[in-house]
Amino acid sequence: MTLRHFLSLFDIDAQEAHQLIKRASELKHLQRQGITHALFPHTVMGMIFEKPSTRTRVSFEAGMAQLGGSAIFLSPKDTQLGRGEPIADSARVISSMVDIVMVRTSAHAKLQEFAEYSAVPVINALTDYNHPCQLLADMQTFSELRGAIQGRTVAWLGDGNNMCNSYIEAAAVFDFELRIATPLGFEPNGALCTQYADRLTVLNDASAAVRDADLVTTDTWISMGQEQDKQQRAQHFAPYQVTAELMAQAKPDALFLHCLPAYRGQEVSAEVIDGPQSGVWEQAENRLHAQKALIELLLRSKT
């Protein structure tokens, strides 16, 4: 048995990544046609949530139901993890009772430790370092709405956060050029930037990043745990708001994406996120389909 985890986009190669996106679109078509695809009956997913979520919980729980299985929601306040049980011990126990686990946590090291001691595949559903499941949905969305992303130009505006780190990973795996526009002091992971310097450019000028881009994307300026710095961060990021004027500097058919939740009038204007270039609602739905394709890939690898 081959045990595979999905802790970053680098856990799949380029061929698998493109095949996974194709499969996600196939599963989406089946779902929209009302065609049952219960591929994994009686399969159970453990869902460990240290951080709250809307899209992640709904997409994984619904996805498991549609695949014929079920999901168990676990939060620290409801489990021994919240009372200080070692992560390794929890991983051994939980993975002996379920078939696959997804973990949404703060420190990436916690996820890595859980995966090290798990007997079943572990999926990264967000850490402070990266958010690879979201990038699968983003790549699927661009593929469906604009075609192949290989060789295209993507502009990331705002915080060099976990989503930005995942876009660096995606640039390497899916073969596109990434321009990152962020204020001084808010750059993405330095090691990633150095390793994939041939794929990206880090700027402090939003207009330069967006110019002739095929995809413009951003994230909230205030992530979970940063609420106390809300005013200061808003001042730093104000020049990076995605407005209609900024989008006009990208290619005429440029797509706008946002992983949500979005705050209109902050990181993006209402005119953009609710406008014709926005693919955010398709993007949000695609979390469901991309993750089902990922679950299929990981569970098939166990056999």
Image (cartoon, grey):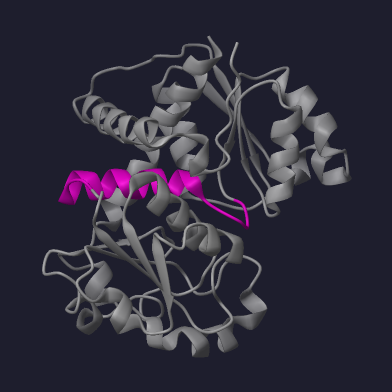
Above or below 225: residue 138: above
Q: Where is residue 259 in the image (x, y as percent from the top left)?
A: 40, 58
Above or below 97: residue 117: below
Quick check: 2 left or right of 23? right
Above or below 24: residue 223: below
Q: Position of residue 116 (x, y in %)?
A: 73, 32
Residue occupying image coordinates x 38% and y 37%: 14
Q: Does the magenta stretch include residue 289?
A: no
Residue occupying image coordinates x 27% and y 68%: 273
Q: Position of residue 23 (x, y in %)?
A: 30, 28
Quick check: 287 left or right of 224? left
Task: Tell me where residue 124 sits by quadrant.
Answer: top right
Q: Does the magenta stretch include residue 132?
A: yes
Q: Main secondary structure of the magenta part?
A: helix
Task: Tell me where residue 86 sits by quadrant.
Answer: top right
Q: Where is residue 68 in the image (x, y as percent from the top left)?
A: 44, 17
Above or below 196: residue 10: above
Residue occupying image coordinates x 81% and y 38%: 87
Residue 1 or residue 58, whichever sits in front = 1
Residue 136 or residue 63, whichever sits in front = 136
Residue range corresponding to the magenta coloring: 127-148
Quick check: 238 left or right of 119? left
